[in-house]
């Protein structure tokens, strides 16, 4: 095998090593539950963070619960 063929074979092997089928990728995907994130519109002077129930959250740290 010539040097250029070795390099080509090595590149092909590297590319295929990290590929997964679409079915496998969908099975491994883990979406967030609907109540874990809420997107709101930005206000002119900052933004308001609200909980899933619609109540304003005073501190961003209150969103993270262990």
Image (cartoon, rainbow, N blue to C red):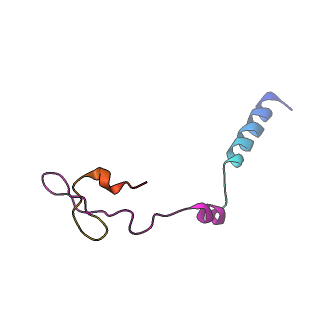
Measuring 61% from the left and 61% from the top, which residue is drawn there? 28
- Between 57 and 45, the one lying in front of the other is 57
Residue 22 position, x and y percent, is: 63, 63
* Main secondary-structure element of the magenta-colored stretch: loop
> Considering the image in quadrants, where does the C terminus appear?
bottom left
Residue 56 position, x and y percent, is: 21, 62
- Between 37 and 6, the one lying in front of the other is 37
Report the residue that reaches farthest toward the right: 1
**Image-based side of 19 in relation to 48, left or right:** right
Is 29 rendered above or below residue 61?
A: below
**Image-based side of 43 in relation to 8, left or right:** left
Report the residue that reaches farthest toward the front: 66
Residue 37 position, x and y percent, is: 36, 62
The question of residue 17 being in magenta is answered with no
Q: Which residues are magenta?
A: 22-50
Is 10 rendered above or below residue 20?
A: above
**Image-based side of 12 in relation to 57, left or right:** right
């Amino acid at each position: 095998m010539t040097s250029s063929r070795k390099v080509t074979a090595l590149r092909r092997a590297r590319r295929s090593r990290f590929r997964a089928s679409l079915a496998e990728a969908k099975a491994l995907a883990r979406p967030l539950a609907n109540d874990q994130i809420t997107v709101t519109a930005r206000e002119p002077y900052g933004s308001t963070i609200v909980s899933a129930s619609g109540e304003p959250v005073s501190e961003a740290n209150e969103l993270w619960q262990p």
